[in-house]
Amino acid sequence: MALTLAGYFISVKLFLNNALPNVPCSMEITHGEFINDQYNHYQFNGSITLWLKSNMITIFGVYDTRDGKKQLNRSLMLERVSKQANVLTAYVKAANIAPGDELHDIGNFFAAKDQSLTFHFHEIKRGEYLVMINNNWVSLCKEH
């Protein structure tokens, strides 16, 4: 009886509690107030999707500054990805800017080539994670 009970709790822990998302996980940002590489304030509305199985991050949204609204559309390819429990570390291999991206001159958004990224995941409920990125960005990430 004790072994059956212990087996049940271990299987629930292994199969129902995910330390990291198994499918793409998106962070929706509304009226996010940030400072860019040139120390200028801007507002971002859009989404950042973590494609952990593909070692990729996609970013799409509207970047709003004193000069008006501009579209942001890029992807970050990751390398040297390491996963331990609820922490993922990686380096940006490449930052691919889509032709429709209107912010080629702002420097980096989110991360630059060769920059390290660290993600700490805390599952709030099934399919939803609180994510802390590089100890300075906290967001809710929902699987889809």
Image (cartoon, grey):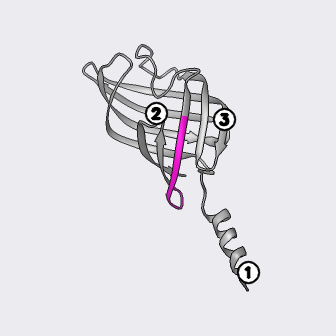
Percent x, y of residue 64: 31, 27
Instruction: Say which amino acid is labelled 3.
Output: Val
Mark 3, Cα crowd under 10 Å, few <14 / some 14-19 / many 20+, is some
9 is higher (above) or lower (below) than 62: below
Instruction: Say which amino acid is labelled 1.
Output: Thr
Q: Mark 3 points at which residue?
A: 81
Residue 76 colored in magenta in the image: no
Q: Which of 132 and 6 is in front in this view?
A: 6
Q: Which of 40 and 97 is in front in this view?
A: 40
> Residue at (42%, 38%) from the top-left corner?
137
Q: Is the magenta stretch mostly helix, strand or loop?
A: strand
The image quarter containing residue 75 is: top right
Q: Earlier in the sequence, mark 2 or mark 3?
A: 2
> Residue at (55%, 24%) from the top-left corner?
115
Q: Is mark 1 on a helix, strand or loop?
A: helix
Residue 60: numbered disc = 2
